[in-house]
Amino acid sequence: MLEPASVEELATQVVQAYQQESPLYPLGGQTALHYGLAAKSEGWGISTTSLSRIVDFPVEDLTITVETGISMEALSQTLAGEGLMLPLDVPQQAVATLGGVIATNANGPRRFGFGTVRDYVIGIEAVNGKGQVFHGGGRVVKNVAGYDFCKLLTGSMGTLGIITQATVKVKPIPESAVTVVVAVESVDVAEKCIAMLLESPTVPVAIELLQGEPWAELTGVTKAGMILAVQLNGTHVEIAWGQQRLVDDLKSQGAAGATVLDEERHLQLWEFIQEFPAQDRELTVQVKTVSSGALPVVAKCLEVDADCIIQSDAANGVVTVGFSEIPDGGIGGVVVTELGPIASHYHGHVETLRCPNPEDLTMGTMWGQLSAPQWLHNRIQEQFDPRGILNPGRFVYQ
């Protein structure tokens, strides 16, 4: 394991690996080692966790520049001291690093109201596969000069460069937050409620459609069927008005009996939702589509396994599904045969987040059907990592 203490040392180590054509596997908090294909060949792990300095924090500008080995928890604590937050809500925040979050494009349940990783990263520094340090963006929000390396590196799985520093936008912590939950007894009612919520003047920050055993205990909703959980953020006055408006509006769409969770249940529910993709189970897959695809995907998942556990960011079309055992047809049957076609129909794809034998995954069972052309991916990678030493085999088209 290589553990550089500075960007300069890291760049020197990459140069040596480039000269020797030795694979390097970038590591942060190591919370996403299960994500992606198995490594193609032996090489060195190279950790960024010693690169965790706060470089610049102009509070009045609502930005912060940090080295990306900083944990999400440490970053959140620093921001909270100034009444600010980075609302990405990713799992395992005590060890997950900002660099890992950017590299895997990890996002949480409040993406509907607050946006995704790509919306927050405005400046980036990384070391490419030749050991060259390069920069993109800047430390001000209105920076439009040059190529948009920030968006290019987000979700690149460490194959284009080892991210060493980032500038991100931050937001004030809301004065208040509340959750309204209600049972929805049919897909038709769920569809009406979600359509209403997408246009609601209450401006929800998260709209979750939940199915399965744990959710009833967490929410206190005991009726059979799916559970809709809606989070509002704002001032105390806004929340007081918004929660009552939501209860009335949900009832008008056929979902009567909505309740407001107390603070303890509210916190427990969203912590569980945040950690759900990282929980240990036999198989976890995630379907990413447009918002209109969420309900059809949920219906298909229940058709595959009526006992599966579903957490769906219904407003964004992201459906995470946990199976306690591998369904008939195996992982390929679930990802490629059952969920793949419906994901493609709604302009999305399927990813395998967790499985018993990750070394057996193929590009098809890991990433589903890909729409991006291979030639474009290869041309970009040739510019950043011509000898293919960064995370070889772990991402698409490798």
Image: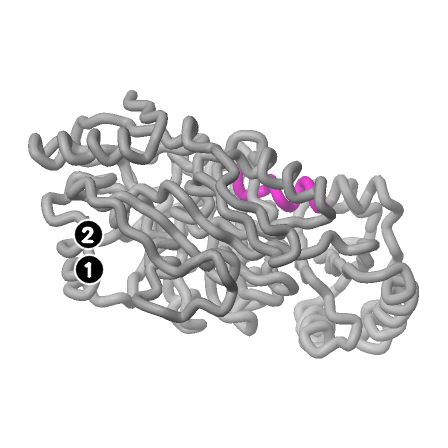
Q: Nearer the viewer, residue 153 or 202?
A: 153
Magenta segment includes 271: yes
In the picture provided, is 237 more to the left or to the right than 233? right
Residue found at the very far left of the displayed protein: 20
The residue range painted magenta reads: 270-278
Q: Amino acid at mark 1?
A: Ile
Q: Which mark is residue 271?
A: none
Residue 74, horizontal then vertical, whole percent? 59, 34
Quarter of the image that includes the N terminus: top left
Q: Which mark is residue 380?
A: 1
Residue 120, horizontal then vertical, whole percent? 52, 58
Residue found at the very far top of the displayed protein: 1
Secondary structure predominantly adopted by residues drawn in magenta: helix
Please, what secondary structure does the residue beneath circle 1 have? helix
Count of number-bearing discs: 2
- What residue is disc 2 on? 384
Q: Nearer the viewer, residue 192 or 117?
A: 117
Residue 312, horizontal then vertical, whole percent? 60, 57
Marks 1 and 2, how far apart at CA: 7 Å
